[in-house]
Image (cartoon, rainbow, N blue to C red):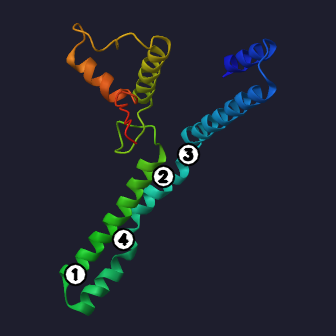
Amino acid sequence: MGRITLYCEVLKREGLPGNEASRMRQWERFTLEALEGLRMVKFYRTPQALRSLCRLFSVFLPPFYAPFYAQLAKDLNSLGTAITFSVMTSLALTALFESLTQMEDPFLSQQSLDGIDVPRETQLIKHELLLLRHKLFFPHAPSPYNHDDATKQEQETAITASPTTNTTTNDDE
């Protein structure tokens, strides 16, 4: 981000209007605020003591509410119903604790279903930017992935990664 600031200053010296430089600095500030928010999520999540308390709570609490289920079995004259409710309660506590640990760190992509795979996302963005830059600077050149030497996987990756591959125009409208 420091290089962006330096480049903005160089552009201002070369004649960039003040309002455009201000807009660039505003985007830089928004980006830094978003990165700081991600950093806060990553490093300052739920403290270890609170997580340990939740784990102990979900493991050692069932013996304390066991007398209630014993009374329920006696009142309903059904041991199966009381056991079912006690198991469901324990499963609910365990599920709440597991969902807490899964939602706590969104950057653990291999350990959770909805995690963010930052290296993969960064690679996809770099690939898309490279293709867009190629189209911007060399608009009449063929795509680097549409030649005979490209593998089928490279061609499919280029098609799925590029947001501008399906740009058909309709002149009838």
Q: Nearer the viewer, mark 3 or mark 4?
A: 3
Q: Are marks 2 and 3 in contact (CB under 8 Å)?
A: no
Residue placed at 41% from the left, 21% from the top?
127
Q: CA distance from mark 1 to mark 4?
A: 17 Å
Q: CA distance from mark 2 to mark 3?
A: 14 Å
Report the disc number at residue 81: 1
Q: Position of residue 37 (x, y in %)?
A: 61, 41
Q: Nearer the viewer, mark 2 or mark 3?
A: 3
Sequence-wise, which precedes: disc 4 or disc 2? 2
Q: Quadrant of residue 67?
A: bottom left
Q: Secondary structure at mark 1?
A: helix
Q: Nearer the viewer, mark 2 or mark 1?
A: 1
Q: Is residue 37 above or below residue 66?
A: above
Q: Nearer the viewer, mark 1 or mark 3?
A: 3
Residue placed at 48% from the left, 52% from the top?
52
- Nearest the viewer among 119 and 43 is 119
Q: Amino acid at mark 3?
A: Arg
- Nearest the viewer among 93 and 17 is 17
Q: Quadrant of the N terminus?
A: top right
Q: Residues within 10 Å of mark 1 (few under 14, many from 20)?
A: some
Sequence-wise, which precedes: disc 1 or disc 4? 4
Sequence-wise, which precedes: disc 2 or disc 3? 3
Q: Are marks 3 and 4 in contact (CB under 8 Å)?
A: no
The residue to which callout 4 is attached is 63
Q: Is residue 82 above or below residue 132?
A: below
Q: Is residue 40 left or right of residue 18?
A: left
The residue to which callout 3 is attached is 45
